Image (spheres, rainbow, N blue to C red):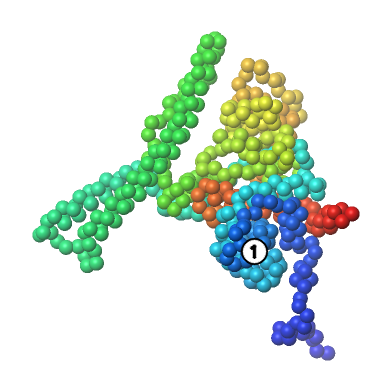
Amino acid sequence: MGVRLKNIDRDTPMIMPPDMRDWLPDEHMVNFIIEAVETVGLQGFRLNHRGSGSRQYPPSMMLSLLIYCYATGRMSSRQIEEASYYDLAVRYICGGSHHPDHDTICKFRVNNRELFSECFVKVLALAHELGGFKKIGGISVDGTKIQANASKHSAVSYKRAGEMIEQLELEVGELMKKAEDADSKALDDGLSIPEEIRRRTDRKKKLEHARKIIEERFEEKRKEKEEEYKARLKKREEQRKEGRKPRGRPPNPPKSTPADKDQYNFTDPESRIMKAGNGSHVDQAYNAQAAVDIEGSYLILGKDVTTQVNDKQQLPGVVAAVEPEVRKVSEVLVDNGYFSESAVEKVESNGGPVVYAAIGKQSHHKTVKELENREDPPSPPDSAGMKEKMLHRITTKKGKEKYKLRKQTVEPVFGIIKEVMGFRRFHLRGLEKVKLEWDLVTLSYNMKRLYNIVGGRIAVFGKLQNQAKIA
């Protein structure tokens, strides 16, 4: 008896038009995203209200398109345009026959940061309604370096820029002298002295601009360090007046000139050279921040992007980024890179959340003595500094239990964004646009995560809402 095979007919046209909903299972993530965007009732769309030009794509469709594509690892506007032809779920979002071009997709993305921020908050409110996370609880804060849309080879250091300016000035002088000397040798064919002088002059102006920007950035940091330096001197002086000996070495005053290695990037001037990974290499990057729920949902509750290489002063801003209607924050977990007395005091002031910050590097290995059940160490006196109080706080039984949650929450989130969603590089340039894209990335992550939490129950939720309106 011969083998029986199914008949694959690609030539016979369909008699009735297909219903694309039959091509995707009800529990598919695309249905969840479309339903969620329609359910939350967004207001911040930017449209051409004059009605001029071609018909516009519905904003809810464009937002669903961006969220789904970012959640499934397609961030380039050209990739998204291409997916509208071959990806069934993307075609379903676009209604089957519509294919937004990459320019339209890019413009919508750039012009709708307010919409992404609004949707970010409303999706978290929806998560609360669906039982996705608690209104009161803790957060874990951390940062990750994400590559800028610029090569580190397009950067120039402060020292090198100065050397190049001197070299260009010498070459311009030589070319001008050559132009004045009638007996000098001519340049190679196709090259002219005026053009070569102009090219070097333009390059010199760009390098001078780069050095000026580096100096302005340095001056901003110097002022901050100067204030910290004076505050530390004042604190040491107060300790002496109280009859106490100041601990540690006296602070050094901040430098007065930029470091030779301070850099400026010509492709994306606002990005910075930052240590990445375990610190073994550097990238032209931005420092992306996230505040993640530690109560079990793994949702991102607050976010930010900074050009600062380290996280010392980022804690207050990231905690403040968690909207009150999203979460009343009770405690904040951070690694030692976030600890500074001023930052912790600012977060905890006026009844703010309690901060649990590691002091120094934490070893992954535990000795037998450390594994033994021990009583909490005695509390430090009220006059103790924040560092001493934090060291006690983090070594108590409660502090240890809380701090364990840090690595279990925020680090897996960054792993999913980079490895599963494939977001390792910003596609936009400039800090404001990069913040916009991080808003979209975190929104897409939250939508993907909420879909996994509720198992696609948004469709049922939407139907119940509609029934309630009819009743």
Q: Amino acid at mark 1?
A: Tyr
Residue 77 vertical placement versus 259 (above, below): below
| The C terminus: image quadrant | bottom right
- Give x and y (percent) for residue 253: 43, 26
User: Residue lying farthest right?
Assistant: 471
Tell me which residue sits at (25%, 59%) in the image.
Answer: 195
Visible in this render: residue 261? Answer: no
Residue 358 vertical placement versus 470 (above, below): above
- Give x and y (percent) for residue 256: 38, 31
Q: Which of the 4 image quadrants contains residue 394?
A: top right
Q: Which residue is mark 1?
A: 57
User: Residue lying farthest bottom?
Assistant: 1
Q: Nearer the viewer, residue 341 or 211?
A: 211
What SS does tag 1 mark? Answer: loop
Question: Image check: 212 left or right of 198?
Answer: right
Visible in this render: residue 344? Answer: yes
Badge 1 crowding class, 10 Å Cα cut-off, few under 14, some 14 to 19, many 20 or more, is some
Q: Which of the 4 image quadrants contains residue 138?
A: top right
Tell me which residue sits at (85%, 54%) in the image.
Answer: 469
Question: Image check: 149 left or right of 22?
Answer: left
Tell me which residue sits at (16%, 56%) in the image.
Answer: 179
User: Residue lying farthest front?
Assistant: 50
Tell me which residue sits at (74%, 29%) in the image.
Answer: 397
